[in-house]
Image: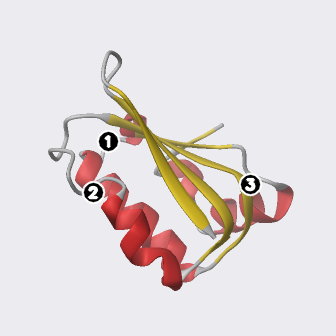
């Protein structure tokens, strides 16, 4: 598993890329990817195109990111979801809380 971050200061966009399994073992690296950014300052793009799995703790981590970002549906976009990952997100009604691209 790997979590990386790219900061686009010009557009105030933070891209967080998840590779492999997204589960509780990635809590700290995921949190570290955004915790030094002032709350409500930036928009976030979570790239799950290389994520093979996510569990309920990953859903909780995404909710924490949403709260940090300002809890507005337009502040966090989740993109690149495979079929299984997209199905999990839709079952959890994350399509109502995030932009799924």
Q: Name the residue under label 3.
A: 50
Residue located 31% across and 25% down the image? 12
Mark nearer the viewer, 2 or 3: 3
User: Nearer the viewer's eye, disc 2 or disc 1?
Assistant: 2
Residue visible at 20% across and 35% down in the picture = 41
Picture quadrant of residue 84: bottom right
Q: Is residue 90 left or right of residue 76?
A: right
Residue at 60% x, 57% y is 18
When the figure is inspected, residue 14 is found, relative to residue 17, above or below; the finding is above
Few, some or many residues within 10 Å of mark 2 (<14, 14–19, 20+): some
x, y percent for residue 53: 73, 72
Q: Is residue 10 above or below residue 50?
A: above
> Is 73 situated left or right of 3 in this image?
left
Q: Quadrant of the N terminus?
A: bottom right
Q: Which of 28 and 94 is in front in this view?
A: 28
The C terminus lies in quadrant: top right
Compared with residue 44, is residue 82 higher up or lower down, i.e. above or below? below
Residue hosting label 2: 67
Residue at horizontal 67%, vertical 60%?
Answer: 19
- Foreground label between 1 and 3: 3
How far is the residue under mark 2 from the one under mark 3? 24 Å
Q: Do the residues labelled 1 and 3 touch (CB within 8 Å)?
A: no
Badge 3 marks a residue whose secondary structure is: strand
In the foreground, 34 or 57: 34
Q: Is mark 1 on a helix, strand or loop?
A: loop
Residue 23's mark? none
> Residue at label 1?
72
């Amino acid at each position: 598993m790997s979590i990386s971050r790219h900061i686009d200061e010009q557009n105030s966009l933070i891209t967080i890329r998840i590779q492999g399994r997204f589960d509780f073992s990635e809590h700290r690296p995921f949190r570290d990817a955004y915790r030094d950014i002032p709350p409500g300052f930036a928009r976030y793009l979570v790239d799950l195109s290389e994520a093979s799995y996510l569990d309920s703790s990953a859903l909780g981590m995404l909710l924490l990111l949403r709260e940090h970002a300002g809890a507005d549906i337009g502040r966090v976009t989740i993109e690149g979801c495979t079929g299984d990952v997209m199905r999990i997100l839709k079952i959890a009604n994350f399509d109502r809380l995030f932009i799924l691209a």
